[in-house]
Image (cartoon, rainbow, N blue to C red):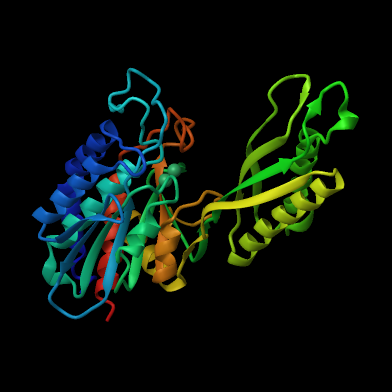
Amino acid sequence: MAEDSEPRVAAAIDRLGEQLVADRRHLHRHPELSYHEQATAELCAERCEVLGFTVRTEVGGTGVVADLDSGRPGPTVMLRADTDALPIQERGADRPVRSQNDGAMHACGHDGHVAMALGAAAVLAGMPDAWSGRLRMCFQPAEEVAGGAQPMIDAGAAEGVDRVLGIHLWAPLQVGRVAVGPGPLFGSADEFGLVVRGRGGHGGMPHTSIDPVVCAAQVVTALQTIVSRETSPFNPAVVTIGRIEGGSAFNVIAEEVRMRGTVRAFEHEERERLLRRIAEVARDVAAAMRCEAEFIRANGCPPVVSDAAVAEVVRRAAVKTVGEQNVDQAPRITVGDDVALFLERAPGCYFLVGAGDVAKHPVAPHHHPEFDIDERCLPIGAGTLARAALIELNAR
Ligand SMILES: [Zn+2]
Ligand SMILES: [Zn+2]
């Protein structure tokens, strides 16, 4: 049935073209920071209601879950889109489409994610005779702080879900291309803290104190060997100390130094090993220097892993959308995304849709004040998503 419905999908995506761009621009002009996505949630809820979905709002905060039941038995397929913006001041006063909220910006493409998900919802709602089971839209807040998925899951968003599909627009990938594959796409992303404690004193009399600044410098250096000396070069991993603070004056030896960092890995065991080794290395290096190091594990999410069978379905959908020659094998990328938590609950696929015209000019990276997407990506993403969902909704 999915095969026969192809001309209808293509026609629907054609008709939706302007709406996709209008939605993305509206969202880009009105970005909302993590946990504050009220207007975005309202827009998603209203649209889904008009399309005939049963809508739940305030799911785990500002999350929205919308279900459309075909009335026929079949799987429940979730389309997940993240809704939040970043605390970045958009650069370029002359940009035609620009954030109107000072200090907030869709610098990761989530404006496009929402627009494409709404587009796919409209396509499927417009051809209810072409599929069975249930379509579930999931508009997830607070992805950028890896804090939105878990509360939605706790509120039941993933209950009964058989498949999870989602897109990340990707500016380094040429617009017109789609990258998809089985296994890990994005790494795990964990935040951790370290506190190195010594004993304060006079900067001119260091022998009467225990200097946590010198110790912290040794700890930072030693932590680099966890990746360079203990991790297989065939298995990418990252340990970054992004923040360090300690001391109050040039001639005072500090009491303590505080650090914060992040760890990225592509396998569960690697993730746990890296975190364990950070704690051990920090503790033992500190002990050698008569200090104490405390390791604090903070927010984190697992790697984003696509199921092989669902990835193959998405690949077929992408081939229909952009042609075989424009579908790439997905790379592994050391950013994180808490879609991982949904993908742990049901087999699914997270894939990349090219969003930059890299053949013409260099593109600003994600999370940059000059980040932008090439809007030609929108019908490609919406089309691939709708086609993949149709295949899954006809699978049994
Ligand atoms: Zn981001
Ligand atoms: Zn993102």
Q: Quadrant of ligand 1?
A: top left
At x 14%, y 61%, the residue is: 53
Image: 160 above or below 115 = below
Task: Identify the residue at image location x=42%, y=65%.
Answer: 343
Quadrant containing the N terminus in the rendered view = bottom left
Find residue 76 and report its image quarter: bottom left
Left-right relation of 99 to 242:
left
Q: Is residue 244 depicted above or below 69 in this figure?
A: above
For the image shown, how many numbered marks are present on the structure? Answer: 0
Q: Quadrant of residue 216?
A: top right
| Residue 386: image location, x then y, percent | 26, 60
Q: Nearer the viewer, residue 149 or 207?
A: 207
Q: Which one is in front, 358 or 221?
A: 221
Image quadrant in which the C terminus is located:
bottom left
| Left or right relative to 309: residue 202 | right
Q: Is residue 8 visible?
A: no
| Residue that appears at 46% across and 38% down | 366
Q: Position of residue 194 (x, y in %)?
A: 66, 45
- Position of residue 3 relative to residue 190, above or below, is below
In front of the other: 24 or 203: 203
Query: Is residue 177 placed above or below 199 in the rendered structure?
Result: below
Query: Is residue 166 visible in the rendered structure shown here?
Result: yes
Task: Determine whether, in the image, residue 297 is placed left or right of residue 350.
Answer: right
Q: Position of residue 261 (x, y in %)?
A: 62, 44
Residue closer to the observer: 349 or 86 = 86
Q: x, y percentage for residue 393?
A: 25, 72
